[in-house]
Each structure stands twice: as C-alpha cells, then as structure tokens.
C-alpha cells in the first residue's frame, strides 16, 4: 500500500507553493481524482487540499458578466439565481451531469479538469493506453470503440471529454482564470483543452502547479433561446454519447448570432465557427440547421463500433437548434 502525504492549503498562494513539489495534485471535491486513484490510474505522492482557500464565490463582474469561483460546487452553480436567469444553458448542462450527490461535491474547477478518458484508460488491466502509459499504443482503435471520438482524434488516442459543463462553457465563450508560479493568466475555453495529437496524456494547457481560480462568462447574450441536449445510454447517470449546447440570439424569428458546441464526440468540446455563421442573419429553419450540422461534423471519422454517432450527432444538432429557437 502506497503512502500519500496530505496537506491543507490556507490560500491560493500557499496552494501553489505546495503544488510545486514533485508528483503533487490539488484536490477539491475529488469526484474524478479519487476514482482514478482507487483504480491506480493516478498515483500522486502528495495531495493539496484546496477546499479552504476561498474561490467558491459567484458574483457579477463590472462589465455585466459573471465570475464563478473554481471551488463553487456544481449544484450551487446550477441553482444560482444569476446563472439560472442569465446563463440557463449552463444550468441545463450541469443538471444533466452526474447524480445529485456528485454535483453536491464536484467543483467547477474540477469539472474543467476531468480527465478525457475511456474504459481502456480507467482499467489498468489493458496495457495499451497512450494516455495512461505513453507509447504503449491505443487499445480502443482496434478494440471496442462504441463510445469513442469521431472528431479531432489522432492515431494515439480516440477518447472523449466526458464533461457536460465544458460543452456549455464552450458555447458561452467562457474564460478560465489561472494563477501559478509565474503569475496570473486568462485562457479562453476554446484553447484550454487539447486535442490528443502525439501527447494524449496532456489534457489541458495548464502548466505545473497552476491553479484554476475562476471561470468568467461574458455579458449574457443567450438568456432566452438555449437548449442542452444530452443523448446517453441511460437517463439516470451516464456520459453523453452525443451532446449539443445550442444558444441563439434571436429577434422576430431571425438569428442574430449563434453558438453551438458538441460533447461526447472529441477530446474537447467541439465548435466550428462556420457552422454558427450560416445561421446568423437568417430565419431558423430545418435546412439551415442541417447545413450547420454538416459543417460541425465535417471530417468526422467513425471506427468499427461508433459509426452511428455521426448520424446521431446530425439529428441531435438539428433538434437542439429547433428546441433552442422555440424556447422562451
């Protein structure tokens, strides 16, 4: 049995100092990390408890946007009055994720850092997993790959990002606030998660000892016409086979601007600006929704067990846009 050091940080600066020691990880709610440690997938020698450093506040920014502290619990975020009224897409996505018990523990920062994964990653009985053991191969490519990526994959990895929250944040143009040994920086959500490329073991652009402090949302432009659609094998608790975050700014039936992000299909939330542009300035109808879906899925590649995901995603995009357009 391996021993693990456990230290409690008193503030963000203290947490960052502690995290600069080798093989150290932050722990907040621990809903993903503890599972991976139990399975011997993650093997830190030191955990830094960040639950007592603040960072749980949710408040309005001077420009009318919203700052969500990294340690805000998913349930608190989903039910916060400003989130529910100004960013209903985020509430919908959070409530579609996990179980109420997990949402009561999971944090916004932790959700952002959920490991992109598949059964070959989480089960160490499978030797071939480039994400867990770089250079060992990808067992999923020739194995059972029903739940795997159809976009943005590489020869080294075809796993998908499991987060519902991340998909909504991508559609809402969120910005991730970071503090670290070299100071603070802001990372647009579109650039926060990585595609696998030749280094699938690296999920995000975070540097060693960097700490997520908050997520900023821009002033609300999509508070009326939004819909988060999650298609999964069982409604009670499962990751998405395909999910769609659709947000429309409409006036008199005409789309002024649109945001569409896909989940369950790639290593990161998937957005294609051209797919959003074809809707702008036009009435929302079936033909344009189909065109947007085609652009979003351009280049999709199926493996032997997940070809159904392409048609499923096409239909899901059209349905989510229709539901968003009809919502009030």
Image (tube, rainbow, N blue to C red):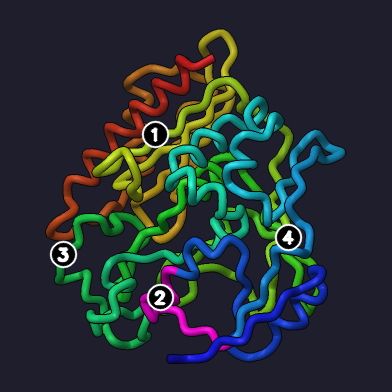
Q: Which residue is mark 2?
A: 38
Please report whichever mark, 4 or 1, sits nearer to the chain's N-terminal start.
4
Element on which disc 2 rests:
helix
The residue indicated by pointer 1 is: 229
| Vertical placement of residue 68 versus 252, above or below | below
Query: Quarter holding the N terminus?
Result: bottom left
Q: CA distance from mark 2 to mark 3?
A: 24 Å
Which quadrant of the structure image shows residue 113? bottom right
Judged from this view, the residue extending furthest toward the right is 62
**Would you name the residue on which mark 3 appears?**
144
**Does label 1 or label 3 sit earlier along the sequence?**
3
Rendered image: mark on residue 213: 4
- At mark 1, the secondary structure is strand
Is the residue under label 3 in contact with that under label 2 (CB below 8 Å)?
Answer: no
Magenta-colored stretch includes residue 125: no
8 left or right, relative to 201: right
The single residue placed furthest to the top in the displayed view is 252
Q: Residue at x 31, y 65 (%)?
A: 118
Q: Which residues are magenta?
A: 35-45
Q: Is residue 48 left or right of residue 61?
A: left
Q: Check disc 1: other Cα within 10 Å, few if <14, some if 14-19, many if 20+.
A: many
Residue extending farthest to the front is: 1
């Amino acid at each position: 049995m391996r021993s693990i050091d456990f230290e409690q940080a008193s503030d963000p600066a203290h947490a960052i100092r502690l995290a600069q020691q080798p093989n150290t990880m932050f722990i907040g709610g621990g809903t993903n990390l503890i599972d991976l440690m139990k399975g011997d997938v993650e093997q830190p020698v030191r955990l830094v408890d960040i639950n007592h450093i603040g960072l749980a506040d949710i408040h309005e920014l001077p420009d009318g946007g919203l700052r969500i502290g990294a340690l805000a619990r998913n349930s608190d975020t989903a039910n916060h009055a400003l989130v529910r009224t100004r960013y209903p897409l985020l509430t919908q996505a959070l409530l579609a994720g996990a179980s109420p018990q997990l949402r009561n523990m999971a944090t916004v920062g932790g959700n952002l850092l959920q490991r992109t994964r598949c059964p070959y990653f989480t089960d160490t009985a499978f030797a071939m997993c480039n994400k867990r053991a770089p250079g060992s191969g990808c067992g999923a490519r020739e194995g059972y790959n029903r739940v795997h990526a159809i976009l943005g994959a590489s020869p080294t990895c075809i796993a998908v990002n499991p987060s519902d929250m991340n998909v909504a944040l991508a559609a809402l143009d969120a910005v991730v606030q970071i503090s670290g040994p070299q100071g603070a920086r802001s990372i647009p959500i579109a650039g926060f998660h990585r595609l696998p490329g030749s280094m699938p073991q690296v999920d995000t652009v975070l540097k060693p000892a960097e700490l997520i402090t908050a997520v900023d949302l821009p002033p609300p432009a999509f508070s009326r016409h939004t819909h988060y659609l999650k298609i999964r094998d069982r409604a009670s608790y499962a990751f998405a086979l395909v999910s769609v975050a659709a947000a429309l700014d409409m006036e008199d039936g005409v789309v002024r601007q649109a945001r569409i992000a896909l989940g369950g299909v790639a290593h990161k939330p998937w957005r294609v600006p051209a797919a959003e542009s074809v809707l702008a300035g036009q009435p929302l109808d079936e033909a344009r929704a189909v065109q947007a879906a085609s652009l979003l899925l351009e280049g999709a590649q199926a493996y032997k067990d997940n070809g159904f995901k392409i048609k499923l995603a096409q239909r899901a995009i059209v349905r989510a846009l229709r539901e968003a357009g009809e919502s009030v």
